[in-house]
Image: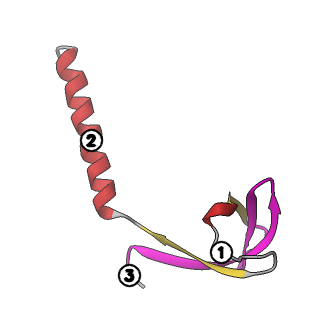
């Protein structure tokens, strides 16, 4: 697994109003929800899913650059 990536397993506990309630396997008191549409096709209650989280370095840098440019424009408009 890459340095800027982590993965963990969750149990698909239930569906509530279009949301999937997921329990983190290692610590089942930790739960979170996702829109059902983000789950793999065919996912059902009781399934174990793997969730991967990756840091998007390029998108982060682009967002930081946009914010920096906006701040610079605002400062130039206010005469600072």
Image quarter in which the C terminus is found: top left
Q: Could you tell whether 23 is left or right of 51 in the image? A: right
* Residue 19, placed above or below residue 22: above
* Residue 66, placed above or below residue 16: above
Q: Which numbered disc, 2 or 1, marks the residue that appears first in the sequence? A: 1
Q: Which mark is residue 41?
A: 1
Q: Secondary structure at mark 3?
A: loop
Q: Which residue is mark 3?
A: 2
Whole-percent x, y for residue 69 in the image: 22, 36
2 vs 1, front mark: 1
Identify which residue, 26 or 58, lies in the foreground: 58
Residue at (24, 38) in percent of width and height:
68
Residue at (22, 14) in percent of width and height:
78
Q: Which residue is mark 2?
A: 66
Q: Residues within 10 Å of mark 1 (few under 14, many from 20)?
A: few
Q: Quadrant of residue 60?
A: bottom left
Q: Secondary structure at mark 2?
A: helix
Whole-percent x, y for residue 52 in the image: 52, 75
């Amino acid at each position: 697994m890459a340095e800027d990536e982590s993965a963990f397993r969750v149990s698909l506990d239930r569906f509530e109003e279009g949301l999937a309630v997921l329990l983190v396997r290692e610590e089942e008191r930790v739960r979170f929800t996702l829109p059902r549409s983000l789950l793999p096709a065919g996912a059902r209650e009781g399934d174990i899913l793997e969730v991967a989280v990756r840091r998007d370095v390029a998108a982060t840098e682009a967002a930081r650059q946009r914010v920096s440019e906006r701040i610079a424009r605002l400062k130039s408009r206010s005469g600072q």
